[in-house]
Amino acid sequence: MLFLVVALVLLAFVLGSVAYLPLPVTLVVSAVIAVWLAVFAVRERRRRTRTEGAGT
């Protein structure tokens, strides 16, 4: 959960600094954060699926 909070804070920081950073830097950083969030979502979904299946 902490990783999710950190990713969202970094995303907010990047969005706030878009006016100051060059566009390529903003796009790269945003893509890295998006991949990070996607990996987190997939891991959480897999973990949840395994624990629900074990209980039935």
Image (cartoon, grey):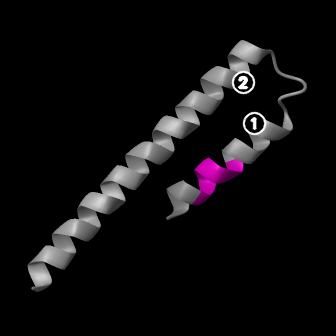
Q: At 52% from the left edge and 55% from the top edge, which residue is drawn?
A: 3
Please name the residue shown 56% across and 29% down the image.
Answer: 31
Say whether residue 14 is left or right of residue 41: right
Q: Position of residue 20 (x, y in %)?
A: 89, 24
When the figure is inspected, residue 1 is found, relative to residue 14, above or below; the finding is: below
The three-letter amino acid code for the residue at tag 2 is Thr
Q: Name the disc covering residue 26, or none.
A: 2
Q: Residues within 10 Å of mark 1 (few under 14, many from 20)?
A: some
- Please tell me the numbered disc located at residue 14: 1
Q: Which residues are magenta?
A: 5-9
| 14 relative position to 4: left or right | right
Kind of residue sitting beneath label 1 = Val
* Relative image position of residue 15 (x, y in whole percent): 78, 38
Badge 1 element: helix
Q: Distance between the Cα atoms at labels 2 and 1? A: 7 Å
Residue lying at the far right in this picture: please name it.
Answer: 19
Quarter of the view holding residue 52: bottom left
Instruction: Look at the image and say whether residue 10 sits in the magenta stretch.
Output: no
Q: Is residue 9 above or below residue 2?
A: above
Could you tell me which quadrant the C terminus lies in?
bottom left
Disc 2 packing (10 Å; few <14; some 14–19; many ≥20) = some
Circles 2 and 1: CB atoms closer than 8 Å: yes
Q: Residue furthest bottom?
A: 56
Q: Is residue 41 above or below residue 22?
A: below
Q: Residue at x 64, y 52 (%)?
A: 8
Secondary structure character of the magenta stretch overall: helix
Q: Is residue 53 above or below residue 31?
A: below
Quarter location, residue 44: bottom left
Earlier in the chain: of badge 2 and badge 1, it is 1
Q: Magenta stretch: residue 7 in it?
A: yes
Residue 43 locus on image (x, y percent): 32, 54
